Each structure stands twice: as structure tokens, then as C-alpha cells.
Amino acid sequence: MAARTRAPRAEAYVDTAALIALADRSDTYHPMFRRLFADPPKLVTTPLVVAEGHGWFLRRYDAARGLQFMAMIEAMTPLKVLPLSAPDQVGALEMLRRFSDQALTMADALGLYLMGEREAAVCWSTDRHLGVTGVPLAIDR
């Protein structure tokens, strides 16, 4: 009998909310994201998401917690922080215009654009507006 091979798991886009939930034990979604990050598929995010997360810990707590967040990002080997190109920035601006009825940040718009370009299977976020293009949110699964 031939051995069964597992199909590779699809890529997940990681938003700021998922990273904050993982790093902050007081977050409602901490247990869920802790489980997801324990056995992740390929993960991608952007420098804007990393910057948002760092800023959140810096403002909410202090510089030490901001640096702890950055150390967590550096240690996450399944997470790839994608480099940004000029076409990515144009695509993000198009998303801001397309979904101008939403309160999207540039980081959100860039995520929406990249999820479409990369055909992400799921978005790891608690922000409902990141599902506007039809990519399922991990919190709904």
C-alpha cells in the first residue's frame, strides 16, 4: 500500500490583530491564536502590520513590550514578512478607494491587496473588514 502524502497547507495572511492576540494574554482571542500559531501553515505578513503591532505595544505598555513584540516576530520562523514594492503600494491605494466605505488603514488595504494577489486561503485577524474581499477569517472557522 502506498503511503499517503499530505497536501501542502495553503498560505495564511497574518494581520496585526492576530499578532497582538498571540502576544497579549489578556486578549479575548489569545487561546485561539495560540493554538493556530502552534501548528501554522505558511504565514505571510507585511512590514506595515509589524509596525502597527510594535506601535500598539509601545503605546499601550512601554518600549520594553514593544521590543518583546519585535523579538517574537524575529523568532517566528513560519512567518515571512513580505518586502513591499511600488505595485503593492498602488494596489493598496486601489483597495482604499474601492472600499472607501470601510475604515481601512493603509496596512489593512495592503493586506487585502496581497491576499488577492497571493490567493491566501485564510486571513488570521479579528478585524471583520479584512473579510470584505471574501477571504475567510480564522475567527469564523
Image: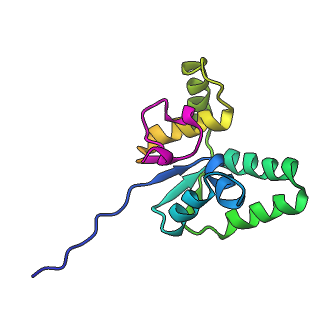
Q: Nearer the viewer, residue 81 or 126?
A: 126
Q: Image quarter for residue 71?
A: bottom right
Query: Is residue 83 something that shows in the picture?
Result: no
Q: Is residue 80 above or below residue 141?
A: below
Where residue 54 sits in the image (x, y, percent)?
78, 52
Q: Is residue 18 left or right of residue 69?
A: left
Q: Residue 129: within the magenta?
A: yes
| On-image quarter of the N terminus | bottom left
Where residue 107 sits in the image (x, y, percent)?
66, 38
Q: Is residue 78 above or below residue 99?
A: below
Residue at the spot 81% in from the left edge and 53% down from the top edge: 57
Query: Is residue 51 something that shows in the picture?
Result: yes
Q: Nearer the viewer, residue 9 or 138?
A: 138
* Residue closest to the far left: 1
Residue at the spot 62% in from the left edge and 36% down from the top edge: 108
What stretch of residues is rendered in magenta? 122-141
Where residue 41 sits in the image (x, y, percent)?
45, 62
Q: Residue 23: within the magenta?
A: no
Residue at the spot 28% in from the left edge and 69% down from the top edge: 6
Where residue 88 sits in the image (x, y, percent)?
58, 37
* Residue closest to the far bottom: 1
Identify the colour scheme used.
rainbow
Residue at the spot 13% in from the left edge and 79% down from the top edge: 2
